[in-house]
């Protein structure tokens, strides 16, 4: 069964820290992987998409890496800010054109 | 440009009533996906369309759930004879055709919060 796991479920850090969120997936033959941000009561915002042929993607203070052989992706957030507080979801597409399989998310709290 | 829109944003209904949830995808997006998200969980796939054709409905939990996209744009997810266990956030996403950005990148709407009393 194709599954996505995110650890930890929750994380609290002080402002300014660099942090890493982890995502692991069964079956390394993925098509692509997306990281999303979810704010309470709001929709999902796509942060980064890594295609299977790529190793990493960067956007501002965010960097996502992909290691298919080990079935892992990490989302690195540099110099965290209180505004980064949200739930971060990792999702995988295994076959082009099919649906995303999501992890349960990591809820991040950044204190000022 | 407008993003994915969903209506209503909130729906409260009584057990046994039918509900229809609407999704209006980003203009030009050919694929449309429906997901359901319970509290504390990631979204779970329900069904998806390419243009007007329903490609996969394996995630629909039972035959009370159905979806259509008759003209390849707006989609409606219908739940008949609602039950309390149907209460959840229902999310819609769309993605552009191949060749317009990373294929299969999905963009989500704000969701419809359904509460069945």
Image: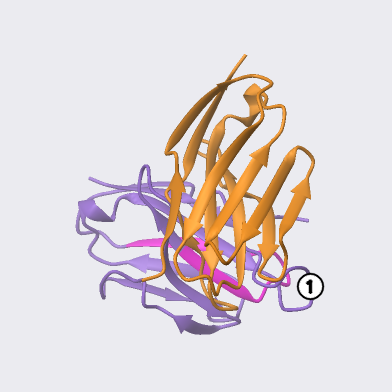
Chain colours: A orange, B purple
Q: Is residue B24 above or below residue A9?
A: below
Q: Is residue B32 magenta?
A: yes
The single residue placed furthest to the front in the displayed view is A70
Left or right, A60 with respect to B95, comes to: right
Secondary structure mostly seen in the magenta stretch: strand
Q: Is residue B41 left or right of residue A37?
A: left
Q: Is residue B27 left or right of residue B80?
A: right
Q: Position of residue B84 (x, y in %)?
A: 21, 51
On the rendered image, what quadrant is the C terminus of chain A found in?
top right
Q: Quadrant of the N terminus of chain A?
A: bottom left
Element under disc 1: loop
Task: Please tell me whether residue B50 belongs to the stretch shown in magenta.
Answer: no
Which residue: 60% across, 38% down? A20
Q: How many marks?
A: 1
Task: Name the foreground residue: B73 vs B42.
Answer: B42
Residue at the spot x=72%, y=42% of the render?
Answer: A62
**Label 1 chain ID:** B
Q: Mark 1 = which residue?
A: B100
Residue A8, x across and y down, in percent = 44, 39
Residue segment shown in magenta: B19-34
């Amino acid at each position: 069964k194709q599954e996505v796991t995110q650890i930890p479920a929750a994380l609290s850090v002080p402002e300014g820290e660099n942090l890493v969120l982890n995502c692991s997936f069964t079956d390394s033959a993925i098509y692509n992987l997306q990281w999303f941000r979810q704010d309470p009561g709001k929709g999902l915002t796509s942060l980064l998409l890594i295609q299977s042929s790529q190793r990493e993607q960067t956007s501002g203070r965010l960097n996502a890496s992909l290691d298919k052989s080990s079935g892992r992706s990490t989302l690195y957030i540099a110099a965290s800010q209180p505004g980064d507080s949200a739930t971060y979801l990792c999702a995988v597409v295994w076959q082009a054109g099919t649906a995303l399989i999501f992890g349960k998310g990591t809820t991040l709290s950044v204190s000022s | 440009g407008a993003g994915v829109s969903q209506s209503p944003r909130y729906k409260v209904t009584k057990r046994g009533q039918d509900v229809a949830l609407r999704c209006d995808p980003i203009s030009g997006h050919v694929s449309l996906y429906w997901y359901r998200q319970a509290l504390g969980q990631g979204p779970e796939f329900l069904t998806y369309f390419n243009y007007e054709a329903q490609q996969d409905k394996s995630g629909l939990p039972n035959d009370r759930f159905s979806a259509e996209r008759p003209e390849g744009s707006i989609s409606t997810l219908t739940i008949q004879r609602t039950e309390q266990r149907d209460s959840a956030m229902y999310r819609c996403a769309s993605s552009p055709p191949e060749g317009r950005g990373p294929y299969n990148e999905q963009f989500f709407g704000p969701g419809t919060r359904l509460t069945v009393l």
